[in-house]
Every structure is written in structure tokens, then in C-alpha cells.
Image (spheres, rainbow, N blue to C red):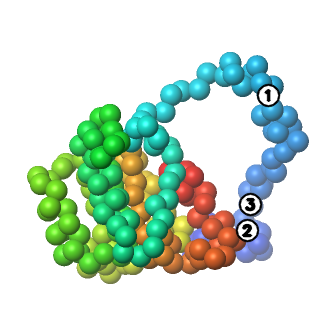
Amino acid sequence: MTNTDLDPLARMVAGAAVPDPEPAPNWPQNLERGVMNERELRNLKVPEREMLVAPFFRVGDFGIISAQRGVGKTWLSCLIARGVSQGGPIGLWTCPRAQRVMVVDGEMPLDLIQERYQQFGEPLENLMFLHHQVLHDMTGQDLDLSVQAVREALVAVCVARGVRLLILDNQSTLLRSVSESEPDSWTRVLPFLLKL
């Protein structure tokens, strides 16, 4: 093991230089820099975010589909994934142009996912899948987004592939250590979800 493999205390004992810790942010100064009056807010130049599903869902938005079991949440996510990936209408909504979409599935059996998407017609190049069963069969790894390394890798894959919409299906299978009834458990993954 080299000195670079040791924690800072062990490195100090071993005589290696310990890097200075990052200085703590000056929060009062930072908050003062972020405060603006209404005129400044109105005049702030904010880049327009591209619409994915008009009239309500733009690039950078975060949404949750919530309903009782068996009412069609996965079907709705399939329709949204197909609509955004090819552009065009989804019922009363519109997807202005084709965008790259990735569906991360942690629940459905692979044959059922194949069956559902085959009903939609020709396959789309802009629609990608990361399926829990395929990942496990190919790598032996479980798809658990409550693990930071897995979250970071997913973001990297999405950026590399130009993904504009990421669909996670579903919370209970992909975020195993996050409990819907324990708000504090969301603090570990909320930054990841907001970063997307």
C-alpha cells in the first residue's frame, strides 16, 4: 500500500504531506451575493429551457408519477418515453422534437418490457434502456441507485449518450434504501435527482 492509499491521519503518521482541507464556504457572503430585488430578478437573463412535453415539462424538470398499483404508471412512462424519443403527440400533449431518452427499469420482467414496447411499432434509436435483469446477467451487479457510485455512473452514462429525459421505474426497486415514509432517507439521493 502506498502513502496515497492511506487516510490523512495515517499519512501524517507515515510522514507524508497532508493536503490542506478545503476552506469552508463563507455562507453570509455567498447568500448576500445571491440576493436580488424584484427589478434585478425580472431583468436577469435566464436561458430558455427546451420543452420536452408541452405544455408542462422542460429539460431540467423533475416529476413523479404517483398512483395506486395497477392503474398504468409504467404504461404512461412508456408513452412519454416513446413520445419524447420520436417527437410528436402524446394524447393531448406534444413533444416538439425528438430527444434522447433513457428508461431505467428496476422492476418489470424483461420479457414483459419487450412485449410492451413491441406493441408501439418500429424501434426508436433515441430510446435507450438500462434494465435491472440485463445488468445483473451481464455483470452480476444489482441496479441500486441508493449507492452513490451507481448514481454517479448513471449520470456519466446519460451525459456521454446525450440523454435529455431519464425515466426511473420505480422508486421502491431502484432506490432501495429510500423510504417513502421517512423523509430523511431522501436526503442522500435528492441532490442526485436535482442534478439530473
Q: Residue 104 falls in which quadrant of the image?
A: bottom left
Q: Is residue 10 left or right of residue 138?
A: right
10 Å neighbourhood of mark 1: few (<14), some, or many (≥20)?
few
Q: Amino acid at mark 2?
A: Pro
Q: Nearer the viewer, mark 3 or mark 2?
A: 2
In the foreground, 186 or 161: 186
Label 2 near label 3: C-beta < 8 Å? Answer: no
In the foreground, 73 or 4: 73
10 Å neighbourhood of mark 2: few (<14), some, or many (≥20)?
some
Q: How far is the residue under mark 3 from the one under mark 2?
A: 9 Å
Q: How far is the residue under mark 3 from the one under mark 1?
A: 43 Å
Q: Amino acid at mark 1?
A: Met
Q: Is residue 3 above or below residue 57?
A: below
**Which numbered dot is residue 8?**
2
Percent x, y of residue 38: 77, 24
**Which numbered dot is residue 159?**
none
The residue beneath circle 1 is 36
Percent x, y of residue 151: 49, 63
**Secondary structure under badge 1?**
loop
Label 2 near label 1: C-beta < 8 Å? Answer: no
- Whether residue 191 is visible here, answered yes or no, is yes
Who's the residue at 82% across and 39% down the image?
A: 31
Earlier-in-chain disc, 3 versus 2:
2
Q: Is residue 159 above or below residue 74?
A: above
The residue beneath circle 3 is 17
- Whether residue 160 is visible here, answered yes or no, is no
**Secondary structure under badge 3?**
loop
Earlier-in-chain disc, 3 versus 1:
3
Q: Is residue 155 above or below residue 186?
A: above
In the foreground, 25 or 36: 36
Q: Name the quadrant of the N terminus.
A: bottom right
